[in-house]
Structure formats: C-alpha cells, structure tokens
Amino acid sequence: MTAAPLTEEDVTPAKVGIFSKEYRASTIGFASVMFLEGFAALALVTTLPVAVGRLDGLTVYALALGGFVTMSLFGSVLAGEIADKRGPRLLLVLGLGLFLAGLLLAGTATTVWQLIAGRCVQGFASSVVVVGLNVTIAQSYPSKLRPKALSLMSTCWIVPSMIGPAIAGIVTELLSWRWVFFGLAILVSVASLIPLGFLRRLSPVAAEERSTPPGLVRAAAIVAVAAGILHFGASGLDLVHVLFALGGVIALVISVPRLLPEGTLRAVRGIPAAILLRGLASGIYFALESYIPLMLINQRQISVTAAGISFTGATLLWAGAAWLQGHPWSEVPRHKLVLLGSVVIAGSSLIAILGVLAVVPPMTASVALIVAGFGMGLVLPSLTVLAFDHCPPEDQGRYSAAMQVSQGLGSVVMIGAAGALFNVGTAVGYSGGLVYGVVFAFVALIALPACLLALRTRI
C-alpha cells in the first residue's frame, strides 16, 4: 500500500507561527519596513497641503497627489519583472534606497516641481518595496502562515494612523514642513538596517531565464503617464482639461491590457477575477476616503479633528479585519471572505449616501468610511492569499505586480471619475448635498456589481 504524499500542512507544526524562531527575523524585518511605509504615507497627509502652499503651487496640487500613484503603477510592473528574475532582495534594497532619495528630494525642494519630483520617486520606490514584501512573504512562509503575515502588514499601519498625522502637524507648526521629510529620511536610514539580516537568507527564485515580454515596460510607462493625465484632466471642465482626460482614457484602454494577466478585464474565474476585484475594491474605498472627509468639513461643517476620526477608525478596523482573516480559528474559505468583505464595502457606500442627508447625524458618513475599512481588511489580504496559493513560484512577482497595478489604476480611475462628477455638479450649480449624493451614488453603482465579481474569485 502506497502512503499518501505529505502536504505542506502535514510538515508545518500547528504551533508554528510567524514569530517562531525560524520566521522571527523575517517577520521583524518586513514589519519594520511596512511600519515606515505606513508612517510616511499617513504623516504626509497633513504635510503635503502646507508644502505645496508654501511653494506657491496650489494650482498643481492634484499633480503632487497623483504623481505618487502614477509612478507606483510603473514601479509595480518593473518590480514584478525583477522579482521573477532576481528574487525580492534587490527590490527591497533598491526600493528603500530610492524612498530615502525621494524624501530628501522633496525635503530640499525650492520649487513645487522639485516637490512633485520627490513625490514621484517616493511613489515608484513604495511600489517596488510592496512588491518585494509580497514576494518575500510568498517565499519565506508556508501557505498556512501567509494570511497571518499579510494581516501583520495591515496591523503595522495602526500606530502610524493614530500618531502620524498629529506628529507631522506638530513638526510642521513648530519647525517646518521640510523637517517632516527629513525626519522620515532619518527613520528610513536607521530602520533599513533591520531587514538586512533576513534579506541575506532569501534566495533567488529557481526559475528558467525569461525575457521581459516586448513592450511591457513601455506599456507600463504609458499607463503611468496616462493615469497622471487623466488625474489632471478630471480637475477642470474647460476644453483643455477635457482633451487631457480623453487622451488619458484612450491611452489607458490601449495599454492596460498589456499589464494584467489574460482574462482580467473579462473577469475570468480565478486569479484574473481576483486581480480585477482588487482594483474595483481599492477604487471604491479610496473614492470614499477622498470625499467623505471633504463633505464632512465643507458640507456638514464639522471640525477637521472630528473628520479625522473617520480616517483613524477606518485604518483600525482595516487592521482588525486583516487580523481576523489571518487566524486559524476563523478558517472560512478565502472566496467567502472576499464575498463578505465586498458586501460590507457595498453597504458602506449606501451608508455614505445617507450621511449626506441633513436629517441624519453628520458622523453617519464617518461610520461609512470605518465600515469600508473593515471590508477592505477582509478583501485585500484574502485576494493576495488566493493569488499566491494558486500561481507558480516563478510568477509570484508578476502577479504581485499585477495586483498593485490593478489597485493603483482602480484608485486613479474611481477618484478621477468621482472628481469629474463633483466638478460638473458644482459648475451646474447643484447644492452641495446633492453633489456629494451623486458622487456616493456613483460609488455605490460600482460597489454593488463588485459583489457579483467576488463570486468569481473561487478557485
């Protein structure tokens, strides 16, 4: 009688965790990197408007925001190719070094264009680091521990979400906005020493030598530029802005299919549907994150501090949901967690519509963003686990890059579309409440079909 082959679960002891001896160095290393990423991202939420204003660049504020996202799209594709050929070590070293350079470039800016350039470098570097971390997790942990490792990535944003904006605000008021960038540069320099130990343990993926598909990097560059053009075009209603937006859309339609696995835009069951859903869910969430605080402050007349509660609450529940999905006592099939999270996100968009009404408490809209954060904490880590559990090791970099591209594109397109609706409604003369209601209704219109797409992520 032939014995059944051992599975990964058979050889991974039940009590082994991500902080067990064999995984402790890797866990501390990637957690420290993710903590810095979160702190930098959230601290600059407070600093960037001040920096752009001091450099007399408010007219190009959208580019200071969009430059980060657009360059992250290009970085994700390039990083995926490097990861599959060289492994994640080079990505993490390169990404951390460029992130440091971007912080210094922005901190020493004498013009708003130098600041934008610094933000672009940071966006490129951030995407390289994220792809590197995803591949590191896929290579360093057995499938049973990957959900916990991914939940820790989300947990690393909890402390930054609570103290990052406040510390950045204090530093900006007492010293200068420049010292926020310089302080982060010092932290990155010191904390980058922590991952060096576990980086030495990583070995390159044992894969056949493959050449980059012709035109892939060029397509990624075109998509990055097109996303930036679309972001700029959505900020105005004159003929120039409309032409820019139209050109951006055409370039995206032509180039995006080259960057995503075959069948993604057709929502083919399995990994393609999972990658598409990642983009839709991210776009829905970040559209809500962009317009709920704006509506609370400008329309419902609540304080900036009170509006910030929604942002902190969303981050906390995002991390809490990510922690829940990563623990064995909640062994719900991944595709069911994706469906549950998608329904929660769709529900949050409906709550946001209610939050516009004058007869309901203003903080109803804050609840919407917090609920959406919980849904994202279930959806994103589960989609990552689904993809890595069902793709060959030599393609982990490519799929990680595809997930980041989808996430970035979803955010750019949804925020751009919501911004266009907002500008049109304002220009026509609709009341503020109606304009915000239309924006949130558009988000809900996308969120509800996304629940159906979640059904196609079952593999």
Image: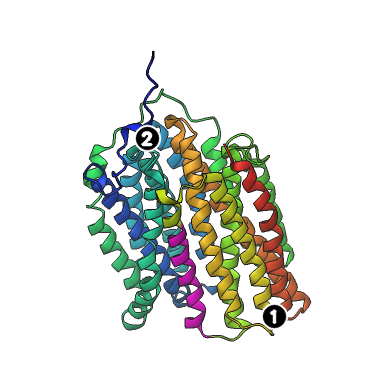
Q: Check disc 1 and give the amino acid type.
A: Leu
Contact, mark 1 vs mark 2 (Cβ under 8 Å)? no
Under circle 2, the secondary element is helix
- Give above or below for 61 relative to 19: below
Which label belongs to residue 225? none
- Report the residue at 61% width, 77% height from top: 295
- Report the residue at 59% width, 40% height from top: 458
Is residue 314 rendered magenta in the image?
A: yes
Q: Check disc 2 and give the amino acid type.
A: Glu
Is residue 105 rendered magenta in the image?
A: no
Q: Mark 2 highlights which residue?
A: 9
Disc number lying in front (1 or 2): 2
Q: Tag 1: Cα neighbours inside 10 Å, few (<14), some, or many (≥20)?
A: some
Quadrant housing residue 45? bottom left
Residue 231, image x, y percentages: 61, 60
Residue 398, image x, y percentages: 48, 37
Q: Looking at the picture, tell me which residue is in the foreground, 57 or 318.
A: 318
